[in-house]
Image (cartoon, rainbow, N blue to C red):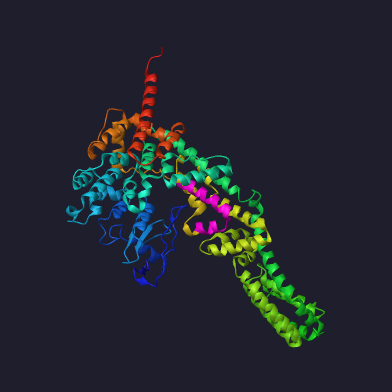
Amino acid sequence: MTFDLSTAKPVAATEMQTSFDISSAVPVSSEPVFASEQERQQVIADLPELEGIVEGEAFRPEIMAALTATNPAEMGEILRQAYPQIGVVQTPEGEFIAVNNETGAMASLNKPGVSKVDILQGLGIMSLFFPAGKIAAAPAALGQKMAVGAAASGATQAAIEGGQALAGGEINPEEVGMSAALGGAGELVAPAISKLRGAKTARSPAAQQTDESLDIIEEITGSRPSIYPAQREGTESLLTQQRYVAQQPETSKMAMDALKKQNQEVYDATAGVIDTLAREEALEGGVERIYKASRNAIKNAKGKVKDQTRPLYDEAWAQGADPVPVKESVIGNIDLMLNDLADGSIKNNVMKAKRAIESAKTFKGLQSAKETVDDLIDSAETGTKAKSYLTGIKSDLLESMTEVNPQYRIANDEYARLSAELVDPLQGSLVGRISRVNDDNLQQITTKIFDAKEVNPKAVTNAKKVIESVDPQAWNDILRVEAQKRIGGISDLIMDTAEATSNRPADIRRALYGNPEKRRVFLSAMDTEQRANFRALEDILIKASTGRGTGSPTNIYGQIAQWLKGGAARTTEAARSPVSTATSALGSLVQERNTKALATALFDPDYTRDLSKVLQGKNTPTKTKAFMQLLDDISRSIQTEQEQEESPAR
């Protein structure tokens, strides 16, 4: 049974799409329909958070994994794979909504105003997983998973110890060490789900996709934007560490320089991909070119109708009908019309129609006059009232002509039939709307083509086919114009030193792709190769936008600081101790040096390659040890350099 998201009441059964677009992590789903924008916002605002979406399933690991995941798209994917009845949609504001199609329950996965980690920090892992009074009955195995997830997610020490006690103290220390260093709560727990078990032994699909996207961008532009190891892997723990070092006094400059460099690189990549659409000259004449192509497309359709009906009209002209009675009748009615019109554009258009009819010397000449009136009606410069008067004149002329010449009626009926088949659909389509834009407002054409509120992907695809049949380059030119228009102004922001590390990749992505509907319309305007290029670019922008931000989740950052105080090399040793050891001071190395080591591994090109190689391995204790060893090597190198600088010159 399917439920209406706005009312939670059953509706006619329809298939709810619940899959995610791999290229963008955006749910592929139709937006719910509401009576008003106010109603939509109120319904969304009143939704509960995740707990309770699957009634009676509080102890399943899938729910626990979803609750500990920090990425709402990941939450939705975990729920969707675990529960076929769960659908996930995304609001225009970016909020993910989960809907249980069997019960009608709805929940927000990332409610505005609530930090994704605040849920874990404020309530604790225990209160999320278990209803009041039922914690004692929870299975020990689940408690073990919960405790490990709590340690990695930055839950309170009380919650960690509670999970440890619930698990009977039987916690895999290697998993705790690995989780703390390389995997967030959802990242560790999700592989325990049978349907996701393969994720623990395979290389990150996100990293694999990023490499493919980088290959495409490099082939296009000749350069490869920097995507740092944490961004490439996409694990929340590494991204949190990247945000952490960017906010520490001893490493903020290194991070700022790296992120500023990345801002410029992804902007250059964006400009390079846009350049593949059309030459730069398109920015000057692209709008005029597609306008001309649209009018020619309609002209060609009318030409086909005229060619197919020409034999019938030739028979009508051969009848030798006298045009004079027709002219006298129609012109007499026009004169009456003119008597009531004041000087202005309407009267001028009526006079043009009158002169065309007066100049006709033959019955065929009257047909030419009719076509002149048609052109006046179709003109974008003709106002609505003038069109109404001209349409009346045309009807009067046709009626008089058919009365005098029956063969003309036969030809005209066939013309009308073919026009309804070949011309009218084109006139009513996006191509027709483009052709009717006033010459003074041609810049509105891009809005008419790409405004997701006015068009849909199918309409855009159909218009593309028509325009390309007339002028193959015109469509690519307008694509270039639109893409350049969307990112205009961002180049100045890239060079703004006051905001050097602002999230420009996210800014570019929002400007270029917009919300899901706007994105679908934009991509539908492209051919297969162009679409692949822009999806690769979007993937790079998504990756480059992660691991940024100025928020400081105190609990998680505190645990990172404690870990760094103990020294990277001793983390695996600490993993053999109880969980509490993982969040206490572990050794004697200086925190500042270890913070620099972590920042170096995350941002310095001389070491990011090494870190990326480590992260390509399977998620095992060996991988964790390799990560810690790399940090320790860097830390020792930094220590040696410091000692050399401090020692007196010999």
| Residue 481 horizontal side relative to residue 242, left or right | right
Q: Residue at x 51, y 61 (%)?
A: 452
In this orientation, which residue lies closer to the viewer: 308 or 392? 308
For the C terminus, the image quarter is: top left
| 357 drawn magenta | no
Q: Position of residue 250 (x, y in %)?
A: 37, 31
Q: Position of residue 497 (x, y in %)?
A: 48, 38
Numbered range of the magenta stretch: 518-542
| Residue 208 horizontal side relative to residue 120, left or right | right
Q: Is residue 506 visible?
A: yes
User: How many numbered discs, if any?
Assistant: 0
For the N terminus, the image quarter is: bottom left
When asked about the image quadrant of residue 353, the answer is bottom right
In this orientation, which residue lies closer to the viewer: 536 or 240? 536
Q: Position of residue 430 (x, y in %)?
A: 59, 65
In this orientation, which residue lies closer to the viewer: 416 or 443? 416
